[in-house]
Amino acid sequence: MSRTAYSSSYRFRSGSDPLAAILQPPPNETPAEREERHKQEQEAKKRSDNIDRMIRETDRRNRKRKTVKVLLLGQSESGKSTTLKQFQLLHAPAEFRAERLAWRFVIYLNLLRSVRRILEAIAPDADSVWSTFDDTDDIDNVEPAAIVIRAPRGSKPRHAQPNASPDYERYMKNFRPLFELEQQLISQLSDRDENTDDEATHLPPQTQAWANAMTPVSNGLSRVASEGSSPPVFAVKSISQSLPPPPVSPTADGELSVPTTSNWKKVFAFGRAQNPKYAHSGELQGWWEDPHDPVHIMNRFAPLITELWRDPKVRRLLTERRVLLEESSGFYLDEIDRITATRYFPTDEDVLKARLRTTGVTEHVFKLNDPGTREIPLDWIIYDVGGARHQRHAWAPYFDNVDAIIFLAPISAFDQVLVEDMKYNRLQDSFELWKLVVSNSLLGNVNLILFLNKCDLLKKKLQNGVKLKNHLHTYRGPNDFESVTKYFKNKFGAIHQSYTPNRTRELFVHFTSVTNTRTTRTIIMSVRDAILHTNLKNTALM
Ligand SMILES: Nc1nc2c(ncn2[C@@H]2O[C@H](COP(=O)(O)OP(=O)(O)OP(=O)(O)O)[C@@H](O)[C@H]2O)c(=O)[nH]1
Ligand SMILES: [Mg+2]
């Protein structure tokens, strides 16, 4: 009977549903076969139910999994890339450390740049022009500068004693091979060659805006203004007659930068010409056995670099002309022997301090746990942008969908001018930029975290007697660290209060020195929790 039923059913469905026909039991099925078939069908259903459950679970996890997008903003040299490196060090230490060897070349270039800056500062033509200009010179004739030198406020430039001048010509002659090395390293960094994939590592072209803004002057030196009636600022042309022109100089300040598509870390990961003895194993060693590795020239020239750096006549000129090496890559000069050692391997701190200007926007993904559940991993996407003026047009597309902005204002830069606009004070630029960010209606619901950065340099500067009120005329308070930082916090806070489209938005302010790993680690953790907390609150409100 049942067999018939199956048969009739089979017949009935066979015409309309071919799949059903295939699934039908055979017409002559015995009870034992039937039992076996039921068993198999039950197991198949169990497997299918399991798969369904797994799919539902994955869906649920995916729905819960969040992506937190953070944008790092601020002017050039405010510390954005350094902050990103701190994120890497905290949340992806293995990747950070795997890249350390590649940074060796950037560190060499930073060191060579410092040498170049010293030589430019002590050049005899710099001295002659130093005595040529006075406070009434035309401030509009500006050349791109490699060095910014400020005269003491209200004073005429002092003339160097001829017998007290450093031996510039001898240094120049002896350093020539180092400039050749600089040239080589740069061309390796910018090479599109057999070591790379198809990614370009070329250097960005000099911008037209920059070229237009700069009017050449005949003697190679010019005077530029910083802010208001602040002390006169002198700029030394980077391409002097005797000093070979910097091989990379997109803005003629000798700053090194590579585009975001660059493959340089891969190219330099094991040294340019890794010793074949070690190449097959991929071991991070052996570069010192390669006679072409730059370490050998660096090592040979270490005593000469030390001599230049410790030369009292050089020091006197640098102090007199207020060449601010400690605000760029000058810190490597204090550790020449370690940095130029044959088996030098960059430390975390060396990498954090290495300066490579960002061009474009770079995206970095980190996996973090939600501190609320400690279970759900979150994708954090951090965008690092180029902060120079001509780079800022690239920021806006990232304003959509961003959860938080970390804005960096280097408050030590109150007596400096922008490299890309030497008539513009850097602090003023930070105020303006901050105003633009806080007033942007697209960013009205975005968490804002303000890093008042370079506090270590600010403290040193104030202790050295540099007066904030000479550069920021509205400042009336004492010139100590406490009062000055409090003032900056209030000033940035007031701009936010006045211009924000969302008055209920909370502003998180931190005093930072982002090259300091210990303090920055704590700050990053609190920033992370604050972002997640407000995100959760916002999600709950929706
Ligand atoms: N002493 C000190 N140096 C800092 C601090 N923050 C950044 N620096 C140094 O300042 C230089 C510039 O920092 P970056 O992080 O490259 O600046 P950036 O904002 O990414 O600059 P762009 O890529 O040009 O937009 C680097 O040499 C850093 O090591 C700080 O808090 N203290
Ligand atoms: Mg950067």
Image (cartoon, grey):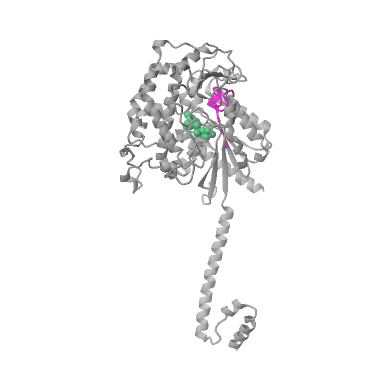
Q: Based on the picture, tell me whether residue 409 belongs to the magenta stretch.
A: yes
Residue 178 lies in quadrant: top left
Residues in magenta, as a range: 406-423
On screen, residue 443 versus residue 480, left or right, reads right
| Residue at x-position 46% and y-position 44% | 92
Q: Position of residue 105 (x, y in %)?
A: 41, 36
Q: Position of residue 373 (x, y in %)?
A: 54, 50
Q: Position of residue 524 (x, y in %)?
A: 51, 38
Query: Which of 269 and 58 lies nearest the eye of the viewer?
Result: 269
Q: How many marks?
A: 0
On screen, residue 228 versus residue 337, left or right, reads right
Q: Based on the picture, tell me whether residue 335 belongs to the magenta stretch.
A: no
Residue 273 in view (yes/no): yes
Query: Which of 55 and 149 lies nearest the eye of the viewer?
Result: 149
Position of the N terminus by quadrant = bottom right
Residue 102 lies in quadrant: top left
Q: Is residue 45 above or below residue 293?
A: below
Query: Which of 198 and 115 lies nearest the eye of the viewer?
Result: 198
On screen, residue 27 versus residue 178, left or right, reads right
Q: Is residue 5 above or below residue 239?
A: below
Residue 486 in view (yes/no): no
Q: Is residue 276 above or below residue 511?
A: below
On screen, residue 2 versus residue 318, left or right, reads right
Q: Position of residue 109 (x, y in %)?
A: 42, 32
